[in-house]
Image (cartoon, rainbow, N blue to C red):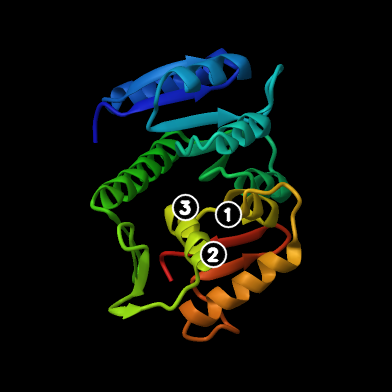
Amino acid sequence: MANEKILVVDDELAIRMALKTAFLREGMQVQEASCGVEALELLHRDTFDLVILDIMMGDIDGYTILQRLRAEQILTPVLMLSGKQEEMDQVLGLGLGADDYLTKPFHLSVLIQKAKALIRRSSIYNNRQRKNEILVGPFRFDLMKLECYKGTELLNLTARELTLFRFFMEHPGQVFSKTQLYQQVWNENVVDDNTIMVYMKRLREKLEDDSSNPVYLKTVRGIGYLFDEKA
């Protein structure tokens, strides 16, 4: 693993320099942004393998930056940093589309390990998709035939169910709220909670061995749903 491009977004110079030194030592390329505006400009101008994103900044907070990225279908892995320890802050970040979360102060070795894991996971997914299929856990989505298999079994999914499950397979381990799912899959801003619940029930009946005790499509209380590829 070398030459990966990292964007470090933090308004504290000392943190940016510490992270830059650590990533350079790992053979990675690093760009810095000291504020939200600068970060968005860089993300629109260039591509990165990972974004290290601080939450509390003077101009635009990390949550807002993350929302804008995901709304624009920029799916670069994001590792969020925060001085807050409260669980709901972590939940909010993950619910908005962050891939992982780390609270300050942290050990650089832990951050580097998390960063490498996120880059590796993204790389594996991209390689799979280039082969005209998505492979996650026991599931295989054929992008040419628009068919989904669990092992060797062809799953009898409707067009909307296929679209919804494909979205989950493209973002394994990531938490999505009902609003995010409705906007991404239905392309509508007015969210119908009941519709999401009905489709999740149908998917579980077709994907899970026991739909009343799901191991793949999990509910994250107070936020939404995630697809667990490690089940």
Residue type at numbered disc 1: Val
Disc number at residue 160? 2
Question: Is the residue marked by circle 2 packed among few (<14), some (14-19), or many (20+) residues within 10 Å?
Answer: few
**Of the residues under marks 3 and 2, which one precedes in the sequence?**
2
Place of residue 42 in the rendered image (x, y in percent of width and height, measured from the top left):
48, 17
Circle 1 residue: 185
Q: Is residue 123 left or right of residue 194?
A: left
Q: Secondary structure at mark 3?
A: loop
Q: Secondary structure at mark 2?
A: helix
**Tag 2 and tag 1, C-beta contact below 8 Å:** yes
Q: Nearer the viewer, residue 69 or 30?
A: 69
The residue at 70%/67% (across/down) is 195
Q: Considering only vertical position in the picture, is 161 above or below 22?
A: below
Q: Is residue 63 left or right of residue 18?
A: right
Disc number at residue 171? 3
Q: Is residue 40 left or right of residue 228?
A: right
